[in-house]
Image (cartoon, rainbow, N blue to C red):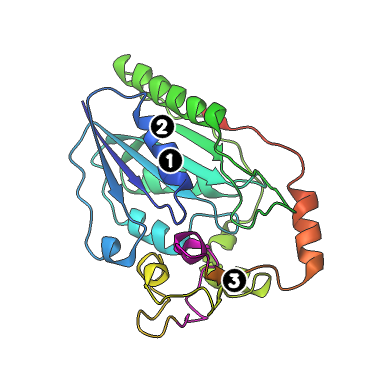
Amino acid sequence: MKTQIVYFSATGTTRALAEAISKGLRGDVSFTDITLPESRTDGLAIDCDLVVFATPVYGERIPAFAYYFLKCVRGNETPLAVVSVYGNMGFGITLEQFSALAKKNRFKLIAAAAFIGQHTYATTSAPVAYGRPDQHDLEQARVFGEQIQRKLDAGDFTPPNLPVTGLPKWIERFPDSGIRFLIRQPRVIRAACNACGACARRCPAGAIDLETLRIDEQKCLRCYACVKACPNGARAAGFRLPVFQSVFRRLGRKKKESRVFL
């Protein structure tokens, strides 16, 4: 059996869960990372027995540029499992988007999951899903892989019964950069920066100039890939107003668990 796992992972959380899922599958598993701009310049051909799409949730939906790329992938009736990774708030319309994509592009959607990962804006003072996915989450992801495998072995291609969120579909048209009204642009701490360019090379939107390290405000996703990538901690960002962090902390206080749909 051949499986192709296609994922977008700005800070490594979705990648970790995708790798955990792969451990529950048999046969050859290949990974296609579509995080960086250069990985999304060409199309993607499907020639396998199972495809897995995994993306984080940005603003209640799949990041627009990642969704656009995936919408161009033709399924040829290949079984598909989809994964949304969210920071303990909600997975929004992402599973509905995946379902619509599967129908339009002739995939057989057979499984879906919504896994928890540390929220992009989590801090020690606002520890929303801090440290997740933990070992329990990763074990759940591995078991999800096993459940997909069993369903395939049984020749069961029935679609999962997905929850309806009630959120309007038009929110998928929001710009990926809309969060910038709540979150400041990651700034450079000059005393710590050695101009290595790690932040620019890891930017999923190609928003950072490699020479000047300046960020294009209209492109910046506030995904914190640059903050996480900097080896010297020379990138910093945060909420524009303290009240935003207080609201964020309250909304993410109740611990949520991952959900699977088969």
Magenta residues, start to end: 214-233
222 left or right of 158 in image: right
Residue 41 sits inside the magenta stretch = no
Residues under numbered marks 1 and 2 in contact, where contact means CB atoms less than 8 Å apart: yes
Q: Nearer the viewer, residue 112 or 137?
A: 137
Q: Amino acid at mark 1?
A: Ala
Callout 2 crowding tier (Cα within 10 Å): few <14, some 14–19, many ≥20 = many
Residue in the picture at 53% in, 61% down: 172
- Judging by the rendered image, the residue that carries numbered circle 2 is 20
Q: Disc 2 residue type?
A: Ala
Name the residue tied to disc 1. 16
Q: Secondary structure at mark 2?
A: helix
Name which residue lies at 34% across and 21% down.
Answer: 149
| Residue carrying label 3 | 178
- Provide the major secondary structure of the magenta segment: loop
| Callout 1 secondary element | helix
